[in-house]
Image (cartoon, helix red, strand yellow):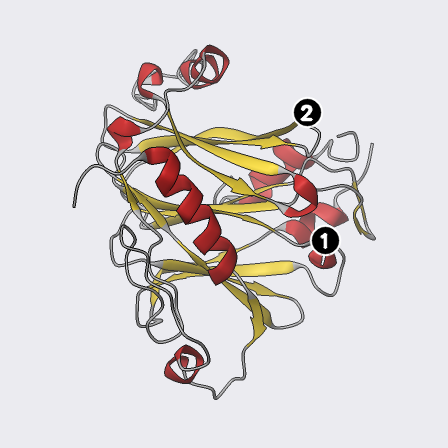
């Protein structure tokens, strides 16, 4: 789900109440996951405080195969990952991508290449859950992606997608909430915000919450034919109820300048949807 919120929320969440050399991929995933946890720390921004001052607040550890750490308080991309070295998708995941163009009107096909689906990376979420991001190229030069959620006990918690994007939009954002949810908040997680950028100027995403706290999340860049940067962020349980919900997201470059459009995170709207 990206930015056509009103139409997509109704269809997707209406039943929520029911519901350098080629790197070693495994090593890079592990390092990316560890650094993402270190850099994705919530802090409250003071309106007049400069990004450079934020950068001076702590030291940055540079890992040999990873790009240097935050300049001006904004995390750099975690790593550049080689798509051809990624783990191929299992048959059931490949099948999900293969259904995207079934019945699509002529000229509106995504052009997805299901047999090229790969595991981009896996991220630890709150409460022991994990999220796996799967990506596939399209014949039109874009990509399709799917987020798979796994509970702490290893059981599936659903997910979102597949969804596709061409390269016309510089950035995109999605929200996954298996639920159930009520007007008081999310009763069971995880709550996942994910996004992508097709412009290499973007190095990080910044999520803003209702209480004005913000969290910086470094992007992981996937090589051609995907050629885009991604993040997957598990929203902490403390931010699952009104007053502290995630509300906005922007992508930024290494100096903290916004890249692409400002995005709404529609969790508040989901809580307000009528229940069946």
Query: What is the distance, in whole Å, between disc 2 and disc 1 at their CAs?
Result: 19 Å
Q: Which residue is mark 2?
A: 155
Residue 57 lies, with reference to residue 109, above or below; the image says: below
Camera-side residue of 88 and 169: 88
Coordinates of residue 89 in the picture (x, y in percent): 41, 19
Q: Residue 81 is drawn in which quadrant?
A: top left
In the rendered view, would you say 265 is above or below 134? below
Q: Nearer the viewer, mark 2 or mark 1?
A: 2
Say which element carries label 1: helix
Instruction: Classify mark 1: residues with Cα within 10 Å, few (<14), some (14-19) or many (20+).
Output: some
Q: Taking 42 as reference, is 19 left or right? A: right
- Left or right: residue 206 compared with residue 171: right
> Dot 2, crowdedness within 10 Å: few (<14), some or many (≥20)?
few
Between discs 2 and 1, the one toward the N terminus: 2
Residue 40: percent from left, percent from top? 51, 60
Lateral position of residue 178 relative to residue 55, left or right: right
Q: At x 26% / y 38%, what residue is drawn? A: 23
Mark number for residue 115? none
Residue at horizontal 41%, vertical 74%?
59
The image quarter containing residue 112 is top left
* Disc 1: which residue: 237
Element on which disc 2 rests: loop
Pick the residue in front: 68 or 2.
68
Does 151 appear above or below 252? above
Dots 2, 1 in contact, CB < 8 A: no
Tell me, yes or no, if residue 53 can be seen here. yes
Residue with the most extreme bottom position? 48
Where does the image place residue 25, in percent across and percent down from the top left? 34, 34
């Amino acid at each position: 789900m990206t930015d056509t919120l009103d139409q997509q929320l109704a269809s997707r969440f209406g039943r929520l109440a029911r519901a350098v050399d080629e790197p070693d991929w495994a090593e890079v995933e592990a390092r990316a996951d560890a650094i993402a946890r270190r850099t994705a720390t919530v802090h409250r921004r003071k309106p007049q405080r400069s990004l450079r001052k934020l950068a001076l607040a702590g030291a940055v550890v540079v890992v040999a195969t990873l790009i240097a750490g935050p300049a001006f308080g904004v995390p750099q991309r975690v790593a550049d990952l080689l798509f051809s070295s990624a783990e191929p998708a299992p048959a059931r995941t490949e099948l999900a991508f293969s259904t995207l163009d079934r019945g699509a009107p002529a000229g509106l096909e995504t052009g997805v290449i299901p047999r090229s689906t790969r595991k981009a990376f896996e991220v630890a979420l709150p409460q022991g859950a994990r999220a796996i991001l799967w990506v596939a190229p399209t014949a039109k030069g874009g990509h399709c992606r799917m987020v798979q959620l796994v509970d702490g006990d290893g059981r599936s918690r659903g997910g979102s997608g597949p969804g596709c994007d061409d390269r016309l939009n510089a950035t995109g954002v999605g929200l996954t909430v298996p639920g159930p949810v009520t007007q008081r908040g999310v009763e069971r997680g995880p709550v996942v915000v994910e996004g992508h950028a097709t412009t290499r100027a973007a190095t990080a995403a910044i999520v803003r919450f209702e209480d004005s706290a913000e969290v910086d999340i470094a992007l992981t860049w996937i090589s051609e034919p995907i050629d885009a940067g991604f993040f997957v962020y598990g929203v902490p349980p403390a931010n699952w109820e009104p007053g502290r919900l995630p509300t906005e997201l922007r992508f930024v470059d290494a100096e903290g300048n916004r890249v692409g459009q400002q995005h709404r995170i529609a969790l508040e709207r989901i809580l307000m949807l009528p229940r069946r």
